[in-house]
Amino acid sequence: MAHPQFQPTSPQSPPPGLKPSPTTESIQIERFQNPPGEGDCHAKDQHTLFMTLRSRPIAYTQTQDGKTHTGLYKKGDFTITPADVLFRARWEGDEDCLQIQLSDRFVHSVAQETLTGNREHFQLLPEFQGQSPQIEAIALMMLAEHEQDYANGPLYLDSLANVLTVNLLQQYGTTRPQLVTYEGGLPPHQIQQVLDYVDAYGDRPIQLADLAQLLKMSQFHFSRLFKQSIGLSPYQYLLQQRVERAKQLLQQTDQSIVDIALTCGFNSHSHLSKQFRKVTGVTPKAYRMQ
């Protein structure tokens, strides 16, 4: 799916090693490193978050929604541009920024499923030089996932996208809606449905929507209730089960570690090794030798 993105108008060479965005209509992630210049962005059906990554502050002059803002942006400062709003910027130093775009359909879906109040006409507001520890932390986790070629898979990225969207809606919306709250976790039969699904399809790319749909529940609330029930997020549980399957194959077969990685749903030897060591404290090779 083609998507609008920030386009500098001053001459430049493409940034080295720019990675593709994940194949999803809900979220697009890019990192831009540009020399001093100016540019614009007009994303008709996507809400855009620009966040500065430079440790040294950089001067921006930005215009959107008929307003202009000039400021010295430090690392973590961000701008929010709602869908179909023209954004223009000029910067006076070497730029390093993260762009996250969320589809309008996805944002409205999250609002409908998770928030109370008037959700039909709820909108994000333009914001210059916003600051939020929660939004910055989530955006940096998305950046890390982007830099690692989305090694953790769609379930992890879906979870981050849902939490980011809820934070944006609560902090930068036309109203300050509250989350619909549920207590007590999931009933045992629903937990079993999810666990059975993970057992059956854990070697495939599972999306958060797949698990939430099993229970006819919003993705955000499913994640919260699942963690209340078993003490792990859906992604953590999936990872745990994949590692357990890898442990069995390492002990009981002579398959190569590469084959075991792919059989268990990891995308490479290195991805299995990293996650295996995080869970068990040893590498797959060392575990097999034990």
Image (spheres, rainbow, N blue to C red):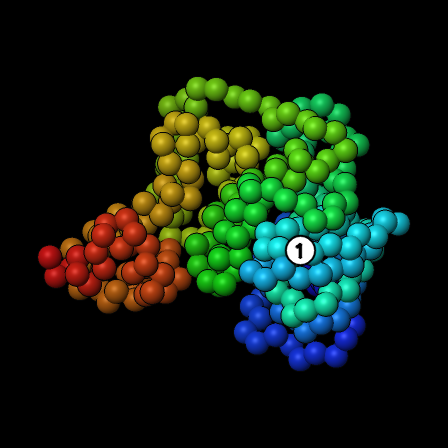
Q: Is residue 101 left or right of residue 136?
A: right
Residue 118 visible? The answer is: yes
Residue located 46% across and 54% down the image: 153
Amino acid under label 1? Tyr
Name the residue that disc number 1 marks: 73
Horizontal relation, residue 66 to residue 31: left or right: right
Above-or-below relation of 256 to 131: below
Task: Mark 1: give few (<14), some (14-19) or many (20+) Cα within 10 Å.
Answer: many
User: Which residue: 55% across, 36% down?
Assistant: 219
- Residue farthest left in this picture: 290
Task: Residue 147 in the image: state x and y as whole percent.
Answer: 50, 63
Residue at (42% x, 38% y) in the render:
233
Residue 142 left/right relative to 189? right
Q: Is residue 84 above or below residue 188?
A: below
Number of marks: 1
In this view, 112 is above or below 140: above
Residue occupying the point 64% across, 51% down: 77
From where the camera sits, is residue 263 visible?
no
Q: Quadrant of the N terminus?
A: bottom right
Taking the view exactly as shown, the residue that stands out farthest to the right is 66
Which quadrant of the figure contains the C terminus? Answer: bottom left
Q: Looking at the image, which is closer to me, 53 or 83?
A: 53
Mark 1: secondary structure: strand
Q: Quadrant of residue 94?
A: bottom right
Q: Position of residue 216 (x, y in %)?
A: 55, 30
Residue 215 spot, x, y in % from top left: 50, 30
Q: Residue furthest top?
A: 184
Q: Nearer the viewer, residue 176 or 203?
A: 176
Q: Position of residue 184 (x, y in %)?
A: 44, 19
